[in-house]
Amino acid sequence: MKCPYCGFAESKVIDSRPVEESSSIRRRRECLKCNKRFTTYETLETISLVVIKRDQSRQPYDRNKVLGGLMRACEKRPVSLVQMEAVADDIESELYQSMLREVESNTIGEKIMERLRKLDEVAYVRFASVYKRFNDIETFMDELNELKKNK
């Protein structure tokens, strides 16, 4: 780390602590040449994730859209906000760990359905009916029968 006072390239860390409510670390440093102290903040660099929609358009990944879909599916169901946020966090973590810069929206939808199936079957069917674009009662019944068969 370059010293902001003399420009020397080497310094030593005197103190290091996490910044409250953030994924940053605050470090107090001392220049090895001029002995002046300065503070730096270290943050984790995340890759930007782009979602490829069904129409092949691209937009930045938005965790709030995942959480919004979960909240609509789980409306008036015995699923807490904490559980929904845990699902959203789990999916987001999995996406970033894949190290892909682009992900198709259907991949995200499948991950949501996989977790909703375990969490609440009614919420799963609600989400699936929108996600899979059920056009008639037959496709809806096929999905219910599949769910029943796997139970």
Image (spheres, rainbow, N blue to C red):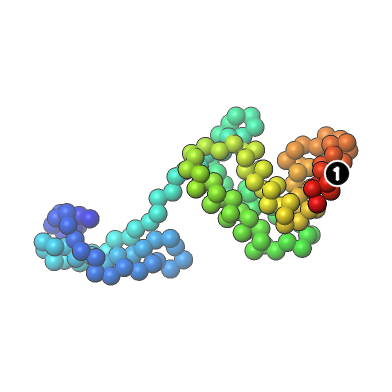
Q: Give the image quarter of residue 11.
A: bottom left
Point out the residue furthest to the left here.
33
Graded by Cα atoms within 10 Å as few (under 14), some (14 to 19) or many (20 or more), the crowding at tag 1 reads few
Residue drawn 13% across the image and 66% down it: 35
> Height in image: 31 above or below 149?
below
Position of 20 compared to 14: left or right?
A: right
Q: Which residue sits at x=24%, y=65%? A: 13
Residue under numbered circle 1: 145
In this view, which residue lies farthest toward the front? Answer: 150
Instruction: Give residue 46's position: percent from left, percent from top.
Output: 44, 49
Q: Does residue 109 appear to the left or right of 142 in the view shown?
A: left
Mark 1, secondary structure of its residue: helix
Residue located at (64% from left, 46% from top): 111
Above or below, comparing residue 79 to residue 121 in the picture: below
| Amino acid type indicated by mark 1 | Asn
Residue 140 appears in the figure? no
Residue 51: percent from left, percent from top:
56, 38
- Between 93 and 118, which is closer to the camera in this rendering? 118
* Quarter the N terminus occupies: bottom left
Tag count = 1
Q: Residue at position x 58%, y 54% from top?
A: 90
Report whether residue 135 is seen: yes
Q: Position of residue 117 (x, y in %)?
A: 74, 51
**Toward the viewer: 68 or 78?**
78
Which quadrant holds residue 133? Answer: top right
Q: Is residue 136 left or right of residue 58?
A: right
Quarter residue 47 falls in: top left
Q: Can you name the residue that lies furthest to the top here?
A: 56
